[in-house]
Image: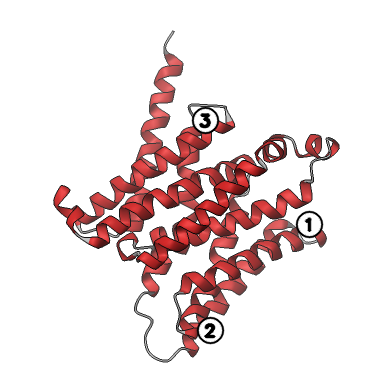
Amino acid sequence: MIEALQFEFMRNAIMAAVLASIGCGLIGVYIVLKRMLSLSGGIAHAAFGGIGLGYFLGINPLWTVLPFSVISAVGIGLVSRKSKLPEDTAIGIFWAMGMATGLIFIGLTPGYAPDLFGYLFGNILMVTRQDLMLMFILDVLMVGLVILIYQDLLSFSFDEEFARVSGVPVTVLYYTLLCLVALSVVMLIKIVGTILVIALMTLPVAIAKQHTYSLKWMMYFSVLIGIVFTLLGVFLAYRLNLPTGATIILTMGLGFIVSSLLKMVIRRKP
């Protein structure tokens, strides 16, 4: 596989795998602990509106997905907490509106959208230097925020009511976490696409959670697991000529199954 590294697109893919795994390994832990999987999926699919807007404006869709995802995340949070609508209803509304908005913008754009399939299902081999720069900036922002508010997020993740009584700004943390999820979505769109984003956010955490109860170690393991399985998926996809996004997810899924079986064997030992 060493010969593959002579190609720039493979080197970019490796850097993208590392950058995405760092940010999403951290945020994915909070998504799993706070049971925000459906909400994260809603944000990911609503972000498709930003992809369509990018095609319509003739710019890199990732730059329009960024504000679109953040606005969608805050919108879902506001509707969920301020209105009488159930959370899953709010998620469904933004999910559908984001997808419909993206389709309309793409329909209004002259010509054919050649990279659309990649944004839906991902293609890490198409990551550019510009994409890597954006991912690096988002990583720095996400890691910095997590370090800054780590203790508050720790209380918020395990016992929201206790955190509120203790004076932790729960509402601010909730919307901050939604924005961090939105940033994670932006990082993962080029890797696994809007359809499979939620899997890459949660599978490394699900594996890590089987082997530690410490939030800090869960983050470390999630990042490491994400890097290992994403790189393995990339090389398998390159060697076998398979879709990269789907190969990465299936590789992680198999990793989760193996991890679960090992956990069962360890538990049965006297």
* Residue at left offset 39%, top offset 20%: 265
In three-dimensional space, the C-alpha distance between marks 2 and 3, rounded to whole angstroms, equals 44 Å
Q: Is residue 34 above or below residue 57?
A: above
Mark 3: which secondary structure? helix
In three-dimensional space, the C-alpha distance between marks 1 and 3, rounded to whole angstroms, equals 31 Å
Report the residue marked by disc 1.
81
Q: Residue flagged by tag 3: what amino acid is it?
A: Trp
Q: Is residue 187 above or below residue 29?
A: below
How packed mark 2 is, by other alpha carbons closer than 10 Å (few <14, some 14-19, many 20 or more), is some
Q: Is residue 21 above or below residue 238?
A: above
Q: Position of residue 191 (x, y in %)?
A: 39, 59
Between marks 1 and 3 in the image, the one whose residue lies nearer the viewer: 3
In three-dimensional space, the C-alpha distance between marks 2 and 1, rounded to whole angstroms, equals 29 Å
Mark 2: which secondary structure? helix
Is tag 1's residue or tag 3's residue first in the polypeptide sequence?
A: 1
> Considering the image in quadrants, where does the C terminus appear?
top left
Mark carried by residue 104: 2
The quadrant holding residue 60 is bottom left
The quadrant holding residue 161 is top right
Report the residue marked by disc 3.
217
Q: Nearer the viewer, residue 4 or 194?
A: 4
Q: Residue flagged by tag 2: what amino acid is it?
A: Ile
